[in-house]
Image: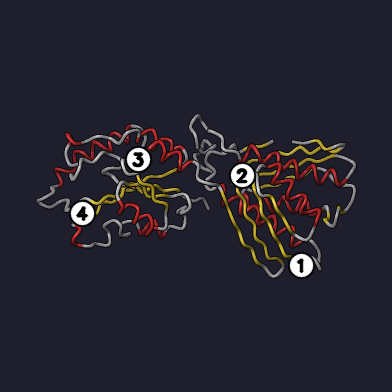
Amino acid sequence: MSLKKYLFLDRDGCLIEEPADEQVDSLDKFRLMPRVIPALLTLKAAGYRFVMVTNQDGLGTESFPEDDFRPAQEMLLGILASQGIEFDDILIDRSHPRDNAPTRKPGIGLVTTYLRDRQLDSRRSAVIGDRQTDMELAANMGLTGIRVGPQGQPWPEIARQLLSTPRTGEVHRRTRETRIRVAVDLDRSEPVFTRTGIGFFDHMLEQIAFHGGFGLELECEGDLTVDEHHTVEDCALALGQAMNQALGDRSGIGRYGFVLAMDESRAEVAVDLSGRPFYVQEGEFPRTSVGGLHTEMVGHFFRSLAQTLGAAIHVRVTGENTHHMVEAAFKGVGRALRPALGRTPGGGQAGAIPSTKGSL
């Protein structure tokens, strides 16, 4: 399921400058916030969607007629639309502060539809505004709050902060056969620690993380008295799930990764973080097991990893020494993942989703 990254944006003091103690309700007071358009374009390219959430005290009453509000609002929307910036929704609370309406920020009455949406990416969505009520709205929604303006940050810094959100994931998996905790950090190369009860398998997992350039902590208690099947399979499923969680909507990644020679063995690996799982393996291992790991589980591991990671993984391995061949395959997958997971500007715009479809 593809998640949606939303920015819930205040209007006055966030998108347009707000004169002291006044509503921006006429064209002579209208000024865009500095550098707001380039920042929003960068965030749009990174897959963010925009919702305007604004309190307009008494809008539509004699003290604040619609005709006083509409010209500046239409100009704002027109300018932004001319640059390709549009809103999924425009939510306006018209009540007076004394009404204590649930729709008035920091109340969540206007945004409940989004909070019920299972596709809301709450880890990466945020509320941006210039007032304390915006920060309180963020807290009430369970989202990050970012303050803009003189008491906060400039728009270029806000865009940078949002695009540099740590890419981490953590999964706890419990079945009748295994108990697993796995945590990954795609932007740090350490720590790398694994404990599965199968020494050679630990070594192979560490090869993926080390050569993939990401931090990995994985602990598993499995039914090794039966055999290693459930441990290897469930570790792959949990690892792929954690990496998929860390990738989010996959904006800004390299997406593709391509090889590896190890002594007499050779592993050719191609990876596509397309969101579509597929696994292909070519080559046979001379021996049936290495260090307590049956070689038939090598392909099963990568197939399970591809399933929850949402990746196409192709491995072609040749050689004479089974240990070298298995290790070359794991190292090769790690090396192919390194550029695929890496943050890479797409289409000339930082954080863009690497697909002409606009999503992965």
Alpha carbons under labels 1 and 3: distance apart: 53 Å
Image depth: mark 2 or mark 1 in front = 2
Mark positioned earlier in the residue sequence (4 or 3)? 3
State the image quarter where residue 264 is shown: top right
The residue under label 2 is 188
Q: At 45% across and 37% down in the image, what residue appears? A: 45
Quadrant location, the C terminus: top right
Residue 11 in percent (x, y) is at 28, 44
Question: What number is the disc on residue 254?
Answer: none
> In the drawing, does residue 316 fall left or right of residue 240?
right
Image depth: mark 1 or mark 3 in front = 1
Image depth: mark 3 or mark 2 in front = 2
Residue 157 in percent (x, y) is at 41, 38
Mark positioned earlier in the residue sequence (3 or 2)? 3
Is the residue 169 above or below the residue 312 in the image?
below
Alpha carbons under labels 3 and 2: distance apart: 35 Å
Q: Nearer the viewer, residue 14 or 284?
A: 14
Is the residue 296 above or below the residue 341 in the image?
below
Amino acid of disc 2 = Arg
Mark positioned earlier in the residue sequence (2 or 1)? 2
Is the residue 308 above or below the residue 356 in the image?
below
Q: Secondary structure at mark 1?
A: loop
The residue under label 4 is 94
Is the residue 261 above or below the residue 288 in the image?
above
Residue 25 in percent (x, y) is at 17, 42
The residue under label 1 is 223
The residue under label 3 is 86
- Badge 2: few (under 14), some or many (20 or more) residues near its Cα, within 10 Å? some
Alpha carbons under labels 2 and 4: distance apart: 46 Å
Amino acid of disc 1 = Asp
> In the drawing, does residue 359 fall left or right of residue 305?
left
